[in-house]
Amino acid sequence: MIKHPASHYLIGSGYDDDFGTRYVFTDPLAARRWTSIERAFPDRSPQLVGWSHSLERTLVYNDRQGSGIYHLVDFRTGRADIVGESYPDISSDHVGQVSIIDYQAADGLGITAYVTLPPGVTEAANLPLVVLPHGGPAVRDNGTYDYWAQAIASRGYVVLQPNYRGSTGYGRAFMEAGFGEWGRKMQTDLSDGVRYLAGKGMIDPARVCIVGGSYGGYAALAGVTLDREVYRCAVSINGVSDLRRMVQAEVREAGTRNDPAVRYWNRFMGADDRGGRNLDAYSPALLADQITAPVLLIHGKDDTVVPIAQSRMMAAAMSRAGKPHEFIQLEGEDHWMSRVETRQRMLGEVGRFLQTHNPPD
């Protein structure tokens, strides 16, 4: 919902689409001004940051075809001046091309995904692939600048970001189609995208790895335990490895099984009503003996969303099973990789691991 900066009356709203946020205004002046801004930035999907009280000046953000630029649009002078950059050291020629694809999952459900190409590449042919599923899982990716995807693409990889079932932005039925599908159809939605790109000749199906954070970290681990033979390596960042223990931790924190967060996890994971032991069949930490690819675990020590114990359990299980893995603990880091130093280290470690186990050349 968007309110007038002076009167605070409701004047419009925004909604997510494939390349950011679209806006609809009921205030005639705001509508005219925003139409002018969209015309001034064709194919850029400008994002509204703020207005002056008179609506004569507007701060907008563009990151569809670059790493992110702030413009101050002044309707009094007819100028749009750059006033800031998100990543001033990343020029446009270092940003990979992002496109939208649509493919069908094995059961016929339509999936929208985003494909990022290595910088300078306009048409992919037989390139290595990294699948990068988003966290949540009830959120979505879009085609704006994603520093994880761009960092990986800069190493020579195609990056696939599917909005698998359970994602938001495609209606309630699509989101609810993810209920009970952790490690099941939510997982094969990802590998169906791999097969789609392979069928188009864009990627080499023998050179595919999976990287993700939070739920995406779980999907990375599930990729080498539950959906084997697709991925050459996996990287889990702040990921879940034991579903039942994750739910139990939420119960302990909430003090009741009827807590909304507990109900959320149970619904999405597909836990039964008798302690959720059925979740063991979809928990990578309990399936470590089935892993056939090297795994990198990265976890923030101070993560309060997914406890670091989840990665420690996974590392211990792989050690017992004699499976190749690395475990990196990030001191003083949270679930969102909020600190610059550890964020850079995380990207560096991911790049190193991919280069070792899935070299692009």
Image (cartoon, rainbow, N blue to C red):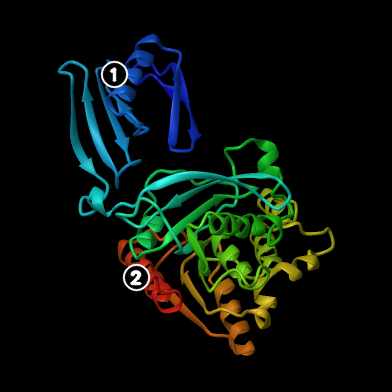
Coordinates of residue 103 in the picture (x, y in percent): 60, 47
> Based on the displayed image, in which of its 4 quarters is residue 65 positioned?
top left
Mark on residue 151?
none
- Residue at mark 1: 53
Among all residues in the image, which is located at the extreme left? 77
- Residue at mark 2: 348
Q: Establish if 347 lies above or below 107.
A: below
Q: Establish if 248 lies above or below 91.
A: below
For this rendering, which residue is in front, 112 or 245?
112
- The alpha-carbon separation of the residues under discs 1 and 2 comes to 44 Å
For this rendering, which residue is in front, 98 or 59?
98
Q: Establish if 177 lies above or below 212.
A: above
Q: Residue at x 39, y 54 (%)?
A: 117
Name the secondary structure under disc 1: loop
Q: Establish if 77 lies above or below 21.
A: above
Q: Amino acid at mark 1?
A: His
For this rendering, which residue is in front, 316 or 21?
21
Q: Residues within 10 Å of mark 1 (few under 14, many from 20)?
A: few
Q: Marks 1 and 2: which is nearer the front?
A: 2
> Based on the displayed image, in which of its 4 quarters is residue 196 positioned?
bottom right
Q: Amino acid at mark 2?
A: Gly
Q: Residue at x 18, y 19 (%)?
A: 78
